[in-house]
Amino acid sequence: MELYKLTAHELHNMLVNKEASSEEITKSVLKRIENVENKVESYITLTPELALESAKIVDRKIANGDVISALEGIPMGIKDNICTNGLKTTCASKMLSNFVPPYDAFVTKKVKAINAPILGKLNMDEFAMGSSTENSYFKKTKNPFDLAKVPGGSSGGSAASVSADIAVYSLGSDTGGSIRQPASFCGVVGMKPTYGTVSRYGLVAFASSLDQIGPLTKDVTDCALVLNAITGHDSMDSTSVNLTPPDYSKALINDVKGLKIGVPYEYLGDGINEEVKNSVLKSIEVYEKLGATVEYFNMSVSKYALPVYYLISSAEASSNLARYDGIKYGYRTEDFDDLIDLYKKTRSEGFGSEVKRRIMLGTYALSSGYYDAYYKKAQQVRTIIRNDFDTAFEKYDVILTPTAPTTAFNIGEKTTDPLQMYLEDICTVSINIAGIPAMSIPCGFDKNGLPIGMQLIGKAFDESTLIKTAYTFEQNTDFHKVRPQL
Amino acid sequence: MKISKDDVKYVANLARLNVTEAEADKLAVEMESIITFADMLTELDTSNIEPTNHAIKMENVFRDDIVTGSYDRDLLLENAPSKEAGCFSVPKVVE
């Protein structure tokens, strides 16, 4: 068995039992990168020396008889919108193609504190805007299960790298499904925690009231371990909740007896691919056999989630991305007449077309005369959607839906019509609107062998129930064990 | 909602973006299609509903007023496209 194929918890056991060193593990993954990264193209920047340095520190600790934590010495990757001190953080944009952060994001500090060998920075849609990673300024990441297909997005590099065994786990960010949808497309586990659970300090802002960092992993156990490593209060993020996070690994329990699962009809209706729907229905049967109660119900306002999401996220993006002006950092145009011309040329040359489209849409929704009709209206409907989830969670412990309406689509298939691409997020955006946690886990394959994911949605701060529900499914099925042939 | 080419140019100026004639044509069509999609929100009566800014309720967040270290000026200026005498350099703004 090659080391790069293993999960973080399997590798941890090998480290503790001295069956492998962190250096051997890291070299195995680096070798795998040498062999398949040219096909998958999931990294923007590779940092093999940095990774090996951390690995050696961990090996010395082990040699000294020191206790190591669960993820110590396990090589991983970081999405390129999460700041890394002294290491380029581009957001897959021309605008930040030369940006070297002078500080670490909270989560970067957290993984450095456990001596994680950082393999590099992962590709994404520019500024996390997209559902296919085709909006990257640098490269198009491929789906490891079929190189003609997209990996999903925006955390496409984070999902593809874990799927292709060129990172044991990775960090992504999720504003409207950007961890869960690529996890679904690439056959890995992805979680968006409750808003405020993971500090956003050092995460380049897209839509601040929706953004959340989370893990992409090979199985549910690793998901719990990564969550343990990155949660906690941070005074540098005013929206970071001041709660002591639980030990999520305590939720790794194979038991759903008595668990109440709700399935909203609206998420299995029009626009959901038949094979995806059938896989989700079969998963529901699995849960019923294991002793959970499943009930179907209506969430009639769910169809409004997508327009609410695109109005709020674009409005917040137009405001957040105003900072890219060619003055303090990032790209600056060559020739300009005056300050306004400098701003306009810098921004027009530095941003890609999807980013510009969202800035335009957001500026429109916030502009005088349209603010009440669009932005305020969207925020009011946001309240209705939140209340709808609150009502549902009075009856159910977990809500179960597909993660995405389709399996991975062809590269180039949805780039001409922005609205078609936005419909990819139809099952995921409502979760960010409500601020609650959700995860995607593998639950089947379509006739072409492409992974299908199901989404488990939980109450605010109840990630533990999601982990238990996901873990039970995983222990009773084999979908997560199917790896792509590269 | 109808979105004209002039609307696009007006918004582009607010957003400090240049758009070519061809881009303005294309953006007018795309933005109209997205905004028309968003118009479905008018089906819902929201007259007595409070808007949500943040999903997780939070009061003002304070910290103790203590002096802490700040970043080194030269380090921060390393990313500046143009700098002079320890400052960001910009084109002349005031005549």
Image (spheres, grey):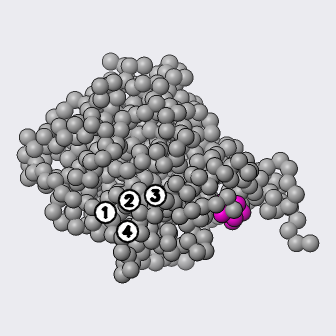
Report the label total.
4
Give the quarter of the image for residue A47.
Answer: top right
Distance from Cα at disc 2 to Cα at disc 1: 7 Å
Q: Which residue is mark 4?
A: B43
Q: Which residue is mark 3?
A: B37
Mark 2 vs mark 1: same chain? Answer: yes
Task: Give SS at disc 2.
Answer: helix
* Direction from residue B89 to residue A469 in the image, left or right: left
**What x and y, as percent, mark residue A242?**
38, 67
Is label 3 in contact with label 1 (beta carbons under 8 Å)? Answer: no
Q: For the residue carrying disc 4, how many other residues have a C-alpha within 10 Å: few (<14), some (14-19), or many (20+)?
A: few
Q: Which residue is mark 1?
A: A301
Task: Give SS at disc 1.
Answer: helix
Q: Chain of mark 1?
A: A
Where does the magenta region start and end? B7-14
Task: Give SS at disc 3.
Answer: helix
**What x and y, as percent, mark residue B5?**
67, 58
Is label 1 in contact with label 4 (beta carbons under 8 Å)? Answer: no
Distance from Cα at disc 1 to Cα at disc 4: 11 Å
Q: Chain of mark 2?
A: A
Q: For the residue carrying disc 1, how many other residues have a C-alpha within 10 Å: few (<14), some (14-19), or many (20+)?
A: some
Magenta residue check for A252:
no
Q: Chain of mark 4?
A: B
Pick the quarter of the image with the N terminus of chain A: top left
Is label 4 in contact with label 2 (beta carbons under 8 Å)? Answer: no
Name which residue type carries label 2.
Ala
Identify the residue at image location x=35%, y=47%.
Answer: A191
Tell which tag, 1 or 4, sits nearer the viewer.
4
Name which residue type carries label 4.
Glu
Q: Which residue is mark 2?
A: A305
